Each structure stands twice: as C-alpha cells, then as structure tokens.
Amino acid sequence: KPPIPDEVRVQRMMAEDAFKANKPDEALHYYETGVQLYPTWPEGNFNAALIAGDLGYYYAAIEHMQAYLELVPDAADAQAARDKILIWQTKTKEK
C-alpha cells in the first residue's frame, strides 16, 4: 500500500490537531478535503464518517462509511461500520 501523498498527510495532521482541540467541524473539513484530494484514502473516509455522525450529519456519515467499506470490504471493523450505517440511516428517518 503506497503512502498517502504529502498534501493529504497535511490534511490528516490538521484534522487530528483540530480533533484534539475539540473542533470537530474543522476536523471534518480537513478529512473531507483529504478525501477529495485522495479518494482512495480509507482512513480519511472512516474518520470523516465518525465525526460527521457525531455531529449529526448523517447523510455525509453514511456516504463516507460506504466509501470506506468499498475501499476495504474485508476490514476487521467492517461489520461495525455497517452497523453504524444502519444507525445513521435510522436517525435520518427520525429527523
């Protein structure tokens, strides 16, 4: 697996820094920018999904988690990821 490009690595570092600073919207922005630059970045999609879900952006969370599962369908946490999608889908219907 090749390393992520430097421009995406910067987005990851900025996202992690924003997350540690309790700025989830900012962290999500950086992850989503990284995913736009490098669409085959599974960790970026996964982290964006979790943050989006926590913020109540369920459609974005679902989209990112589905992208994650397409990139790594045999991930150790694939079932948990699918379960998150089901939870978010249910929450979109409740809104």
Image: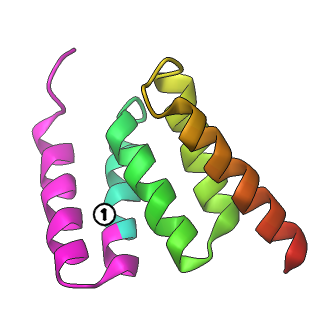
Vertical placement of residue 61 versus 8, above or below: below
Query: Is residue 42 visible in the rendered structure shown here?
Result: yes
In the rendered image, residue 8 lying in the magenta stretch gets the answer: yes
Vertical placement of residue 87 versus 53, above or below: above
Please identify the quadrant where the N terminus is shown.
top left
Q: Quarter of the image holding residue 15?
A: bottom left
Q: Quarter of the image holding residue 12?
A: bottom left
Q: Position of residue 90 (x, y in %)?
A: 82, 62
Q: Position of residue 7 (x, y in %)?
A: 16, 46
Q: Identify the residue at image location x=42%, y=35%.
A: 39
Please identify the quadrant where the C terminus is shown.
bottom right
Tag count: 1
Q: Identify the residue at image location x=35%, y=34%.
A: 41
Q: Identify the residue at image location x=29%, y=84%.
A: 23
Tell me if 34 is positioned left or right of 75 in this view.
Answer: left
Q: Position of residue 31 (x, y in %)?
A: 34, 57
Secondary structure that dominates the magenta span: helix
Q: Identify the residue at image location x=21%, y=56%.
A: 11
Tell me if 12 is positioned left or right of 88 in this view.
Answer: left
Tell me if 6 is positioned left or right of 93 in this view.
Answer: left
For the residue pair 5 and 66, the one nearer the viewer reads as 66
Reading the image, the residue beneath label 1 is 30
Dot 1 lies on which element? helix
Q: Quarter of the image holding residue 56?
A: bottom right
For the residue pair 17 and 11, the one nearer the viewer reads as 17
For mark 1, does the 10 Å Cα neighbourhood hold few (<14), some (14 to 19), or many (20 or more) residues? many
Amino acid, disc 1: Tyr
In the rendered image, residue 88 lying in the magenta stretch gets the answer: no
Magenta residue span: 1-27
* Residue furthest right as drawn: 93
